[in-house]
Amino acid sequence: EAQARRAPVSFAGDYVVPGDLREVERFCRRHDAVAGDLIVDQAWTESDLTALSCIQSVGGRLVVKGTRALESLDGLSFARQDTPLAAVRLVDNAALVDLSALASMDGLRTMGLVVQGNEALTKLRELPSLVGGAQVTLTDNRSLVSVVLPDAVRRGTELAHVQITNNPSLESVSGLARVGRAGAVRLQGLPQLHEAELLVDLHTADSLDLMGLPRLDSWRLAPRLGSVERLVIEEVDGLRALPGLADLSRAGEVRIVGNERLEDISGLVVARGDHPT
């Protein structure tokens, strides 16, 4: 009886959520936080995460992977989350369509975002803000149509990489304002993409690769880019003229290949002092 009245404490280590709701109820009587990763996997057969509403904070990653029946993240609150999540990983969830629970968590931040292989997901928005060093990967989500990525917490934030690849239904992508520097930025294998307004404050990147985007005829992607080690524009077949990069002062390798309608590359001007080249 004394133990039953004891206040819940943080669970030490990673918590892999069992499929048996009675076990989850027992966990919630004892714990209100997870010091490591919170992992929901194929054992979970509920349509939402209401049973996990007791968890007020997570010290590691939020991982939701391989679920078959999960449709939404409703139930998660993380009401006492005062540090960034190590990552949000949403991978191979067959029925997941609703991520709005993440938007209800005021001030939620993350050091990584992976959305991969979620067959039913059609839109992605209102995600946690990104902190410095974060990695962003969106890949193999076959029904995904529109993406609004989160902005960085602070102006000038550096990201490790941004990879948006192999999403065959994706039509529009925007977001990632206040990011000043990034490692690899890659948009590839997006046959329906025709709107891109992304990384509007980016000034430095290790690489910027735009490949296999046949419907993209213009973009507002990294318009303030000043320095890039590698720039690749390949098989962007709707493009007739390269959008201007007025601030570009340094470009290492530049590869412009296989763009069927491209006629004008005058937008690609690298200024060296007062002498554009």
Image (spheres, grey):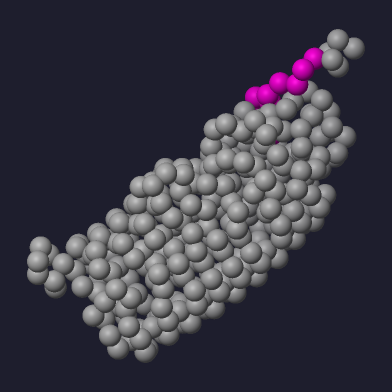
Task: Tell me where residue 118 appears, x and y as whole percent.
Answer: 66, 61
Q: Quadrant of the C terminus?
A: bottom left
Q: Quadrant of residue 260?
A: bottom left
Residue drawn at (13%, 71%) of the image:
276
Quick check: is 147 in the magenta stretch?
no
Task: Tell me where residue 236 appears, x and y as whole percent.
Answer: 40, 80
Residue 14 visible in this rendered orientation of the protein: no
Quick check: is 14 in the magenta stretch?
yes
Outermost residue toward the right in this view: 1
Q: Is residue 17 above or below residue 250?
A: above
Q: Of 259 and 15, which appears nearest the observer?
A: 259
Q: Quadrant of the N terminus?
A: top right
Residue drawn at (30%, 88%) of the image:
263
Using residue 111 as the reference point, say whether residue 207 is left or right of it: left
Task: Tell me where residue 157 appears, x and y as whole percent.
Answer: 38, 46
Residue 220 visible in this rendered orientation of the protein: yes
Using residue 91 as the reference point, say whether residue 43 is left or right of it: right
Q: Of 217 and 2, which appears nearest the observer?
A: 217
Residue drawn at (44%, 63%) of the image:
198
Q: Of 194 and 11, which appears nearest the observer?
A: 194
Residue drawn at (19%, 63%) of the image:
249
Magenta stretch prevailing secondary structure? loop
Number of marks in picture: 0
Q: Quadrant of residue 27?
A: top right
Q: Is residue 227 above or below residue 27?
A: below
Using residue 70 as the reference point, say whether residue 61 is left or right of it: left
Task: Tell me where residue 34 appears, x and y as whole percent.
Answer: 66, 30
- Range shown magenta: 6-15
Using residue 65 as the reference point, say whether residue 179 is left or right of it: left
Q: Is residue 174 above or below residue 193?
A: above
